[in-house]
Image: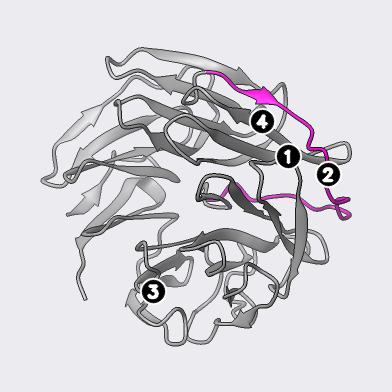
Amino acid sequence: YRGHSKEGLSGRAMTFVNQDAVIVAGPKGVFCGRYFGGDLVEQPPLNGAEDIRDIHLFHNGTISLMSSGDTGRIYVLGFNGEQALVFDTNKVFLDGFDFWDEQNGIVYGDPVNTHFFLAKTSDAGRSWKAFKPAVFPAILNKEAGFAASGTGIQCLDDSTVYFATGMADTARLFCSYDQGNSWVAKNTPLKSGGSYGIYSIYFWSEKEGMIVGGSWEQTDYAKQICYYTSDGGETWINRSKGLGGYLSCIQGNEAGTCLFATGDQGTYFTLDKGLHWHLLFERNYYSIVVNKDFVAFAGREGSLEILRYQF
């Protein structure tokens, strides 16, 4: 399928629904479902949502949606369509959330005082509680996250979670192995400062994964925008060669043997963990979701593309 999620909907939040549809969400709380065959299912906008940047579908059919902007909020959409505002941060910029399982999840936002904003849920996103970790590294000057496509955070196994930062002189990967109670920050060589930093991460195990970014203002900079780690962020290998510039999202299959990345300079794929990147098409998108059979891309003005892949 190649067309639109909804005309004019520049959606950055996206998820698959079963094997035949995607949900795309974006500014002003607008979201919709689009079947691979082209049929559109429209939903009433979420009241008070500024810009939906992340979305999660639970097995029971309920959906959590995270709104970013001047005041970060989290909503729940019931399987019967009822909407509820379940968490209001009171003027915190939220960057992304993820879930370990059907009950437990975590959301992060830009720093408040001495550490990044963190909140957890233990009831499938129906309620959230902000918390301060027992151990949290000092934040750097101007350090913050990037909401981008909501893929700056990832939960792994039953207790590990990573989130990425930028804007400071060093881009870092924050790592917790106990569901957010304590953290370590690992430096990365990805270019940072100002609008530069890590915009998206994708790990296919606790040890192995990739980070991407650059600058949305200087989109043709391509020297230090993609790095690979095989030891959980202790060391990094530059995998930027073959990429055209700023990347807002990277996602892939469960084994990491097929990865997709997209940004202002085009959309790419790799079958060898970034050793060789190939231009998939020059069209650029904001967000990517991948399952074992399909990959979907969403971008500005409602652009949407869904491909079946195999290798």
Going from N to C along the chain, the mark reached first, 1 or 4, is: 4
Mark nearest the camera among 3 and 2 is 2
Residue furthest to the left: 37
Residue ID at (21%, 67%): 309
Identify which residue, 25 or 138, lies in the foreground: 138
**Disc with the residue nearer the chain's start (4 vs 3):** 4
Q: Which residue is mark 4?
A: 119
Q: Earlier in the sequence, mark 4 or mark 2?
A: 4
Disc 1 to disc 4, how far (Cα)? Answer: 11 Å
Boundaries of the magenta span: 127-148
Q: For mark 3, what is the residue?
A: 268
Q: Position of residue 268 (x, y in %)?
A: 39, 74
Between 61 and 157, the one lying in front of the other is 157
Secondary element at image label 2: loop
Type of amino acid under label 2: Val
Discs 2, 1 touching: Cβ within 8 Å: yes
- Residue drawn at (55%, 59%), measured in percent from left and top? 200
Whether pointer 4 and pointer 2 mark residues with C-beta atoms closer than 8 Å, the reply is no
**Separation of residues labelled 1 and 3 (CA atoms):** 36 Å
Q: Residues within 10 Å of mark 4 (few under 14, many from 20)?
A: some
